[in-house]
Image: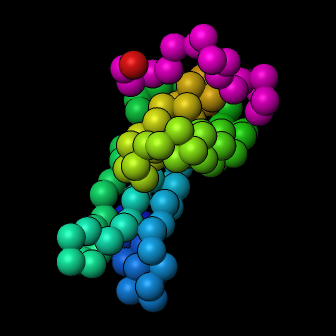
Amino acid sequence: MSGARAERATVRGLLDARVPSVVLTCGSDGAIVGMRGPGGVPVLEHVPALPVHAVDTTGAGDAFVGALGRALVRGDDLLAAARYATRVAAFTVRSAGAQPSYPDADDTLPGGD
């Protein structure tokens, strides 16, 4: 099974096992968000990674998870939170190091506002 198919199958399997929602990061391929739609039907959405020149991927996953949590706490739905987290991760990989590459509140993230 190809990587993308295996990743989607993993998310689908977790949803089938009654996990209410899943976010699976896929590195330079972005992330897959799985959740229940109307009537409890599983919905899988691919959130593509943003095209940036990656210098160092150290800490990108941690930045993604932290940004996802931040967006959920501020009230974003899971898909919007994953889109925001993808933008933060894209910002992070553009420079070397983990914490030094994380954005500040006044930094402009790739991919729009």
| Vertical arrangement, residue 18 with respect to residue 27, above or below | below
Percent x, y for residue 25?
52, 55
Q: Main secondary structure of the magenta part?
A: loop
| Vertical arrangement, residue 60 with respect to residue 103, above or below | below
Q: Which residues are magenta?
A: 96-112
Residue plotted at (77% across, 33% down): 98
Q: Quadrant of the N terminus?
A: bottom left
Q: Quadrant of the C terminus?
A: top left
What is the quadrant of residue 66 in the picture? Answer: top right
Q: Nearer the viewer, residue 75 or 98?
A: 75
Residue plotted at (44% across, 85% down): 18
Percent x, y for residue 34?
38, 66
| Residue 30 shown in magenta | no
Q: Is residue 20 left or right of residue 56?
A: left
Q: Is residue 109 left or right of residue 34?
A: right
Let me know if residue 60 appears in the view.
Answer: no
| Vertical arrangement, residue 32 with respect to residue 69, above or below | below
| Vertical arrangement, residue 110 with respect to residue 60, above or below | above
Let me know if residue 17 appears in the view.
Answer: yes
What is the quadrant of residue 37 in the picture? Answer: bottom left
| Residue 97 shown in magenta | yes
Residue plotted at (60% across, 40% down): 70
In the picture as drawn, the residue positioned furthest to the left comes out as: 39
Percent x, y for residue 46?
33, 54
